[in-house]
Image (cartoon, rainbow, N blue to C red):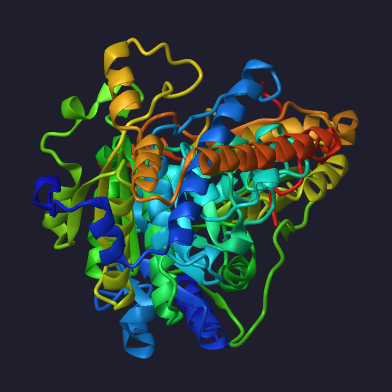
């Protein structure tokens, strides 16, 4: 199977789906000749033309709105919001329009749009180009929230997102764009609401998303040499959320750590922890449930500060040691 | 085009120039009456506790809705706003289903989920009334784009108020619609007030429609209480749009008699102002007088239409009252498809 990057996997997914389905088109800023801020749509203008690689002025609310309006007439638009931080500009269209239309109009509207958005820090882009806002989107009923970790998942979940009849926020992580993995050419989909157990283990359950999955896996391999056997679960989609896989795992391990780059307060770790403590897994818990999350601050510019603002491998490792060895 | 540039001609001359039949004129009059009666009934039902929440009555603005309705096709797409009852009735909506929605019934247009602010009927291309001021304006761009990409003949009409014209998305949408020459008609119903804010304190330059020049869009500012002027302007705008020349913005000057919503005590305008509009510029009264003058209506005809429309409204109330409430156990239906 060919090895390609996460970024190429998303491009391949878009490309193949546009070939298969003429209702699919892209809409966003600088996605034509420039190829998008990260080069993700590079080459697509020549292949599909300016009508389907629809470049827009810098008008984020109306980019999302363009996708919404077109979807109401049966199109399958994929909008690109250049940085996830800019989603805050589009919240009326995402939160009040796309998310609520089907419900408030009595089930008559379908809004099959995908809004792609690169999240995360680590590029030195500072406060307004680095945030992870998936918890905020997760709080709006009517939206689905997807966060692929591997190139394989990026393509498979993207195809599912495009074919889903609901608005889907497709959260990519910038630092994953260059990571490589095996991706089959041609059509395959990954269902929403199915968590992936990225590493099996019996001593501790760690739930993590995108870049934090990779960091946690690296830590888990190191700690395995010391006899700590860690299970790593990637929910892959926050909405819908596969609570059952997590609960089942905690019943087995009796311990839970949740890791995300998003700020801690109001972060989705809270939802996972509440779901576990309210479940049958409560009876199996034999350590405090902990989380390692982004600090409650904007992402700073300075390299050292930026690093300090979000979980690093050493933070995850320290927390795992505390849970497994005691020390609270 | 500005209002004072419009031609001065008699009603008869105007009718004959527009080639409107007696039937068309009487039908327009009947629709205006239906809208007024519908809203008066909704107000009464609210007072009786049968409609809860709030509602935004458009009484006084009927000529805009009906003139627009006459100029477009029934399969054209519509996006409108919270004060949108008239547009739906002018687009031949089912009044029973509207009334049922007002009363929150399961048979209503939105199965009781939307209420008066969110009437929508996708099969008849009514894409929904929006409760966010200006919220519908930007997605009209996507609707127009899809119509263009699908090589279709329909157009999309977006109706919004003077207040909405100060939302940023108004400018984004007009720019993009012009840039892509979309089949979009933008209709600004200027009823003078955004809730309580007088438009002259909210817009740096009036009329609002002249902003279209910044985007190279043809515009006009018209007397929105004169049915024939509204019809003619919209008809011409629609012809322009259907010939793939891009969007048009029409601002119709009108006035609402009731408060912004049910919480409004009219502290920001005088009784005299309201009475002056009611007594001297009412669109229905004005059109009725004109029809009487040219002999298309007499006292008996007026009475007959009043009775007919009342019957329609009463039947809608009876339908709504006899309809079931939505089952509370279905509260989670329709969140996702």
Q: Is residue B212 left or right of residue A159?
A: left
Picture coordinates of residue A60, whole percent (x, y): 33, 53
The quadrant in which residue A132 appears is top left
Task: Look at the image and tell me in which quarter the N terminus of chain B lies.
Answer: bottom left
Picture coordinates of residue A109, whole percent (x, y): 62, 57
Q: How many marks?
A: 0
Q: Is residue B200 left or right of residue A277?
A: left
Front residue of B129 and B41: B41
Whether residue B307 is visible here, answered yes or no, is yes
Whether residue B237 is situated above or below residue A207 in the rendered picture: below
Whether residue A49 is situated above or below residue A199 in the rendered picture: below
Front residue of A80 and B207: B207
Picture coordinates of residue B257, whole percent (x, y): 39, 25
- Residue at 54% x, 63% y is A72
- Residue at 36% x, 38% y is B283
Front residue of B201 and A32: B201
- Residue at 15% x, 41% y is B207
- Residue at 33% x, 24% y is B279
The quadrant in which residue B254 appears is top left
Whether residue A122 is visible here, answered yes or no, is no
Q: Is residue A218 left or right of residue A7?
A: right
């Amino acid at each position: 199977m060919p090895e390609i990057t996460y970024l190429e996997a998303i491009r391949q997914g878009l490309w193949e789906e546009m070939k298969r389905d003429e209702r699919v088109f892209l809409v966003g800023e600088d996605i034509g000749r420039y190829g998008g801020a990260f080069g993700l749509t590079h080459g697509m203008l020549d292949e599909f033309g300016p009508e389907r690689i629809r470049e827009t002025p810098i008008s984020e609310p109306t980019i999302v709105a363009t996708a919404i309006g077109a979807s109401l007439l049966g199109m399958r638009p994929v909008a690109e919001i250049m940085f996830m931080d800019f989603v805050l500009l589009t919240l009326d269209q995402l939160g009040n329009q796309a998310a609520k239309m089907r419900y408030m109009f009595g089930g008559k509207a379908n809004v099959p749009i995908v809004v792609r958005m690169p999240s995360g820090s680590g590029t030195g882009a500072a406060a307004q180009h680095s945030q992870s806002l998936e918890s905020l989107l997760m709080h709006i009923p009517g939206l689905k929230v997807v966060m692929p970790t591997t190139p394989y998942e990026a393509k498979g979940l993207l195809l599912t997102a495009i074919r889903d009849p609901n608005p889907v926020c497709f959260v990519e992580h910038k630092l994953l764009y260059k990571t490589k993995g095996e991706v089959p050419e041609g059509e395959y989909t990954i269902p929403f609401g199915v968590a992936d157990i990225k590493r099996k283990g019996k001593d501790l359950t760690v739930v993590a998303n995108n870049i934090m999955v990779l960091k946690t896996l690296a830590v888990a391999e190191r700690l395995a040499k010391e006899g700590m056997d860690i299970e790593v679960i990637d929910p892959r989609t926050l909405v819908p959320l596969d609570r059952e896989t997590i609960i089942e795992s905690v019943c087995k391990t009796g311990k839970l750590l949740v890791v995300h780059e998003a700020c801690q307060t109001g972060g989705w770790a809270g939802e996972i922890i509440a779901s576990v403590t309210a479940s049958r897994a409560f009876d199996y818990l034999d350590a405090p449930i902990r989380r390692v999350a982004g600090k409650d601050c904007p992402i700073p510019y300075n390299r050292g500060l930026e690093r300090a603002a979000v979980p690093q491998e050493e933070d995850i490792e320290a927390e795992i040691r505390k849970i497994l060895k005691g020390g609270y | 085009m500005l209002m004072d540039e419009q031609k001065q001609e008699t009603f008869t001359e105007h009718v004959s120039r527009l080639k409107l039949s007696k039937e068309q004129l009487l039908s327009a009059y009947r629709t205006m009456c239906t809208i007024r009666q519908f809203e008066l009934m909704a107000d009464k039902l609210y007072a009786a506790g049968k409609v809860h929440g709030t509602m935004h009555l458009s009484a006084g603005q009927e000529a805009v809705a009906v003139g627009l309705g006459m100029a477009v096709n029934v399969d054209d797409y519509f996006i409108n706003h919270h004060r949108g009852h008239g547009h739906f009735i002018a687009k031949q909506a089912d009044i029973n289903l509207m009334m049922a929605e007002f009363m929150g019934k399961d048979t209503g247009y939105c199965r009781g989920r939307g209420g008066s602010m969110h009437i929508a009927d996708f099969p008849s291309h009514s894409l929904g009334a929006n409760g966010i001021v200006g919220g519908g304006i930007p997605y009209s761009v996507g609707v127009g784009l899809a119509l263009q990409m699908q090589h279709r003949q329909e157009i999309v009409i977006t109706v919004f108020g003077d207040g909405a014209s100060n939302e940023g998305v108004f400018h984004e949408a007009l720019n993009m619609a012009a840039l892509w020459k979309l089949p979009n008609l933008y209709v600004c119903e200027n009823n003078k007030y955004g809730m309580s804010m007088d438009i002259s304190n909210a817009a740096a330059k009036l009329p609002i429609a002249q902003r279209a020049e910044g985007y190279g869009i043809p515009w006009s500012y018209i007397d929105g209480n004169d049915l024939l002027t509204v019809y003619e302007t919209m008809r011409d705008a629609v012809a322009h749009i259907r010939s793939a020349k891009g969007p048009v913005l029409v601002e119709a000057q009108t006035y609402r008699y009731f408060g912004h919503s049910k919480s409004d005590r009219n502290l920001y305008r005088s009784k005299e102002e309201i009475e002056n509009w009611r007594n001297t510029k009412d669109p229905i009264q004005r059109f009725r007088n004109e029809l009487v003058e040219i002999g298309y209506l007499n006292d008996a005809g007026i009475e007959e239409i009043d009775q007919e429309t009342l019957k329609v409204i009463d039947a809608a109330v009876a339908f709504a009252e006899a309809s079931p409430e939505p089952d509370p156990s279905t509260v989670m239906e329709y969140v996702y498809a």
